[in-house]
Amino acid sequence: MSSILVDPTSSAAGGQFSLAPRRFRDLDGRTVGLLNSSKFNSDNLLNGIADLLVERYAVKDVIRRRKGYFGRPVERDLAEEMASTCDVVITAIGD
């Protein structure tokens, strides 16, 4: 499956990307990582998402982490930690 990624802050030309292969069908028994971008209200959005996931699935654990600054990419050590401990990682921007 191929999709087009469009960046709303730049020209209309988008880049091509492919979705990662699905490793499992649902979140039952999985660890979900929530990566807070450090922007205002992103924690509120992620907490709401966590509540819904825990309510609808038998999520094993929810791990919450926060980026140092929203205007920069996630720190390598934080990304590696989340990749090694989480089955799924969700991030949010906020505002």
Image (cartoon, rainbow, N blue to C red):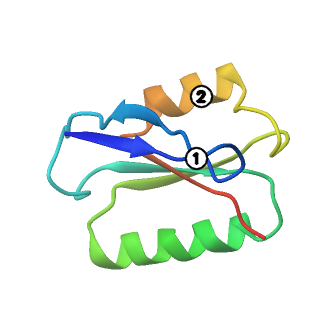
Q: Residue at x 69, y 44 (%)?
A: 10
Please name whichever residue, 40 or 55, is drawn nearer the observer in this view of the structure.
40
Residue 50 location, x and y as percent? 49, 68
Q: Earlier in the sequence, mark 2 or mark 1?
A: 1
Quarter of the N terminus within the rendering:
top left
Q: Which residue is mark 1?
A: 12
Residue 51 appears left or right of 75: left
For label 1, the SS is loop
Q: Which of the two marks, 2 or 1, is nearer to us in this view?
A: 1
What residue type is disc 2 on? Ala
Residue 48 location, x and y as percent? 55, 77
Residue 36 appears left or right of 12: right
For label 2, the SS is helix
Question: Vertically, is 45 above or below 77?
Answer: below
Q: Which residue is mark 2?
A: 79
Residue 29 location, x and y as percent? 25, 53
How crowded pointer 1 is (Cα within 10 Å; few <14, some 14-19, many 20+) is rated as few
